[in-house]
Image (spheres, rainbow, N blue to C red):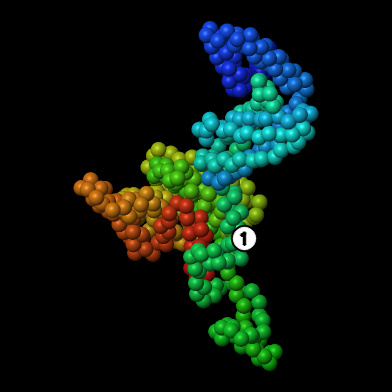
Amino acid sequence: MKFIKSLYIHKQFYIYMAIASACFLLSLWIKILYPIAWIVTILIAILLFVDVLLLYRFKNGIKARRLLPEKFSNSDANPVPITITNSYIFQVYLDVIDELPIQFQKRDFSYQVSLIANEIHDFSYSVRPVERGEYFFGSLNIFASSKLKIVKRKYQFQKEQMVCVYPSFIQMQKYDFLAIGNHLTEFGFKKIRRIGNTQEFEQIKDYVTGDDFRTVNWKATAKRGALMVNQYQDEKSQPIYSIIDTGRVMKMPFDGLKLLDYAINSTLAFSNVALKKHDKVGMLSFSKTIETFLPAIHKLTYLNKILENLYNINTQFTDSDFGLLYAQIKRKVTHRSLLLLYTNFEHISALKRQLPYLQAISKKHMLVVIMFENTELDALIAEDAEDLQSIYHKTIAEKFSFEKRLMVKELQKYGIQTILSAPEKLTINTINKYLEIKAKGLL
């Protein structure tokens, strides 16, 4: 039974049978073709027997292994390496079909390769998940055929493997060294202007050309008989919270990824940078209820806890309760903190309903409201209007785009910092805003 299940007919076999059938058919008019047709048929039968013998002579003629990591990075290209070993003593032709998780909706994966005797072949392909959760890979199927190409033998490996898709740790690693070294400008990102000094004293040092005269320490200068200056550094151990709105407004997809997932990826990358800057990092998610609250702590291992909590966050099809958010912050966040609120407002009226709560929060804390640009609207606005319907669509798109800018002005009017970002640029814009606030000593 196992033999029958693993035996497949090669498409080349049908070509051979078509030739034999044509000979039988033509023999009705050309009699000499009749014995030739039988010879061809017998030859095909012999080749069939020989091919089966060649492929089934070895119990494990082909060995293969799919090397999956413990976790995938959401929204990134994740490599899936495969190693194949040919244990046959002759060259084989392989068709590799991997059963990908249902989330990818890809049923046409195929890879062809020929291996000489005892050859080991490595290759990889990439997958890009756009949802967090568990992904189940099916069997790794390999169909082996000899040079005769009469039949194929099916091999199956690793019938079921599971990989968890986590928030984008690849993106986190990408921005880690850039932000720590303050080299973001070298990559064409937003320039950070350092204005003045923060208030955290570091040391007294000798004056060198270029030091600010306002930092001269006159007592130390009189004692040493040489100019001495105070050196300051960015204030450390400041509490910073990433607040994620999980309401229905965050369900909107861009490039296959929900706004919520853009916010989650940004939170992870930003939290890593803030911890490396020696600040305290916390997290809060809410909709109709407070779903997650992690107090701000400065501990590098705390990032793992943040990652696990981000993995379990999902959107809710409800309107978020900003009054509840204000009450939670007032009760739990007792020190002045930097609050990065990831949310989205599509209409100015929706913002005005929540504005009193945002104002109340910003009175005690440094609040940054992070909203998303609708890049699809920008593409529509850039198109030429050729008829009445396209003029109407373009006008509505411009109205929505204008309202977004109006919302930014409205928030800034009340002293609330804002970020209006395209989803794909959210992480870098958030990190830049954080570095700007640190440089200006606003917190």
Disc 1 marks which amino acid?
A: Phe
Residue 343 seen in render = yes
Q: In this rendering, is residue 14 above or below 181?
A: above
Of residue 302 and residue 92, the one placed in the foreground of this image is 92
Q: In this rendering, is residue 262 above or below 54?
A: below
Crowd around label 1: few <14 · some 14–19 · many ≥20 (10 Å): some
Which quadrant holds residue 248? top left
Which quadrant holds residue 142? top right
Residue 334 seen in render = no
User: Residue 172: x, y in percent?
Assistant: 58, 53
Q: Give SS at disc 1.
A: helix
User: Residue 115: x, y in percent?
Assistant: 71, 34
For residue 319, side relative to residue 50 (left or right): left
For residue 345, side relative to residue 169 (left or right): left
Residue at mark 1: 177
Of residue 355 and residue 145, the one placed in the foreground of this image is 145
- At 50% from the left and 69% from the top, the residue drawn is 192
- At 35% from the left and 52% from the top, the residue drawn is 379
- At 66% from the left and 40% from the top, the residue drawn is 123
